[in-house]
Amino acid sequence: MRVGLISDTHGQLAPEVFDLFQGVELILHAGDIGNEQIITELRALAPVRAVYGNTDRFPLVSRYKRIDFFMLGKYCACLTHIVSSPKTFAYELFKMNKCADLVIFGHTHRAEQSRFKDILFINPGSASQPRYGKMRSVALMEIEHTEVKVEFKYF
């Protein structure tokens, strides 16, 4: 399964995203969407799952969850906007009595991936407002039976 990961669009969707997400089966938006038009445009490519971020307001906060748990193939996935640190978030999952193999998040505007215990944390960066002298970014995630591969795309 090929999944497009995007975050921090803040109401702006660069045309490059449409080329980069060609052929994805699902798009996950990790918050700070900006407006519903972003989701509508992404749905032209593939089904979209999204959560709201700290800058999103009504009506987005009434339509989307703050944190979403679901299955991606055999993997338990968690989609959220803010992860203070992988260690702290793993503890929060424990307190919520939830498990996750994958945590997709945004907020920092920095593309990164890390692993804590058995959880893979993925932040696609910002598709509209990069920070730290970086370029805009999204990620492509390939889910196979035995592994998850993540490739960051900069534009």
Image (cartoon, rainbow, N blue to C red):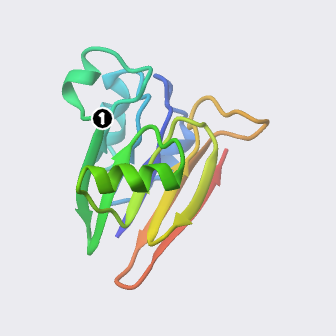
Q: Is residue 151 above or below residue 11?
A: below
Which residue ends up furthest to the right in the rendered image?
133
What x and y, as percent, mark residue 28?
36, 48
**Splitting the image into 4 quarters, where does residue 137 fall?**
top right
Q: Position of residue 85 (x, y in %)?
A: 54, 48
Q: Is residue 132 left or right of residue 136?
A: right
Quarter of the image holding residue 71? bottom left
Q: Is residue 148 left or right of residue 99?
A: right
Residue at image coords 26%, 75%: 74
Amino acid at the residue labelled 1: Arg
Viewer-side residue, 90 vs 125:
90
Residue pointed to by mark 1: 66
Provide residue 101's location: percent of width, then percent of height. 37, 67
Query: Foreground residue, 43 or 74?
Result: 74
Q: Residue at x 64, y 39 (%)?
A: 136
> Is there any visible trace of residue 20 in the rendered image?
no
- Assign the N terminus to one quadrant of the image: bottom left
